[in-house]
Image (spheres, rainbow, N blue to C red):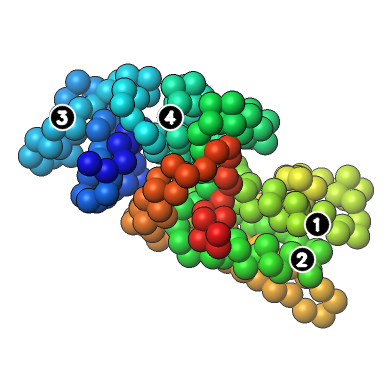
Amino acid sequence: MGIKISVAGATGWTGRPVAEAVHAAEDLDLVAGVSRSAAGRDLGEVWGGELNGVPVRRTVEEALDGVAVLIDYTAHDAVREHILTALEHGVAVVVGTSGLTGADYAQIDALAHERGVGVVAAGNFSITAALAQAAALLAARHLPSWEVIDYASETKPDAPSGTALELAERLAQVQPPAVALPVAQTAGLVEARGGSVSGGQVHSLRLPGFTLSTEVIFGLPDERLSIRHDAGTSAAPYVAGTLLAARAVMGRVGLTRGLDQLLLS
């Protein structure tokens, strides 16, 4: 038997391929999915195939019995309570849902330490996105001036994206961004300078034609460095990183932010 896992959002755009990959993995055991609309049914049937013996539960709390890890790909307004519920039950969590604040993460880290379990949260579980973030963090040691541009589809509700938010917060931890002219002193529309995240500026574009792209631009006199990650139209890039995190979280206590932390450890 493998690591027992429940997937919240198991019928969703990212949650379904993640749940399918968990079910297919020899060292992982998918014991439940969470979906309000499909509650009470067999997950294989919901996916349009044969019965696979995996029940669909209405709530996260109903899906935690005997579970070691909860994987969450749900909604920004539900994820915090899902995580706290799992931690209260002593269940480790892998968080792929965006929308959490710094205060949320502090609370999650404290409760995870109290319960002696781990949480791995990433704004983006793509391996290539994690490598782009690692490269940006290395650059930030030497290049103090930067801003982040966040591109997503016109219907994405949260801004900035979890990927951009995590990147800006972690860049600022390397060293505070250098700003020649304080944003508050901008002539005209101060809002045109973007939103401030840990003292760095993040600009969110929401347009048709984008799925999710994140770019950080570093500037020095007479030169620039741009590091950018572009996601395609499927959720396939996020599966391998999520499963990697589900395996790794069992050996951790407290919050780990960023898939790159697992890749480089």
- Residue 227, position in %: x, y? 62, 68
The residue drawn where x is 63% and y is 47% is 165
The residue drawn where x is 45% and y is 26% is 90
In this view, the mark in front (4 or 2):
4
Q: Which amino acid type corresponds to the residue marked 3 in the rendered image? A: Asp
Kindly check if marks 2 and 1 are in contact, taking CB atoms under 8 A apart as contact.
Answer: yes
Precedes in sequence: disc 1 or disc 4: 4
Kindly check if marks 1 and 3 are in contact, taking CB atoms under 8 A apart as contact.
Answer: no
Q: Which amino acid type corresponds to the residue marked 4 in the rendered image? A: Val
Query: How many angstroms separate mark 4 from mark 2 (CA)?
Result: 36 Å
Looking at the image, residue 12 sits to the left or right of residue 50; the answer is right
Using the image, tell me which numbered label, if any, was put on residue 85. Answer: none
Precedes in sequence: disc 2 or disc 1: 2
The residue drawn where x is 31% and y is 26% is 66
Mark 1 — residue? 175
Q: Residues within 10 Å of mark 2 (few under 14, many from 20)?
A: few
User: Does residue 6 sit above or below 88 in this rendering?
Assistant: below
Q: Is residue 198 or residue 109 the one in the foreground?
A: 109
Looking at this view, name the residue that lies furthest to the left: 50
Mark 2 — residue? 141
- Residue 175, position in %: x, y? 80, 57
Precedes in sequence: disc 4 or disc 2: 4
Residue 217 sits in quarter = bottom right
Mark 3 — residue? 42
Mark 4 — residue? 91
Q: What element carries label 2?
A: loop
Kindly check if marks 3 and 2 are in contact, taking CB atoms under 8 A apart as contact.
Answer: no
Precedes in sequence: disc 3 or disc 2: 3
Q: Is residue 35 or residue 259 the one in the foreground?
A: 259
Query: How many angstroms separate mark 2 from mark 1 (CA)?
Result: 7 Å
Q: Can residue 98 be seen in this view?
A: no
Residue 141 sits in quarter = bottom right
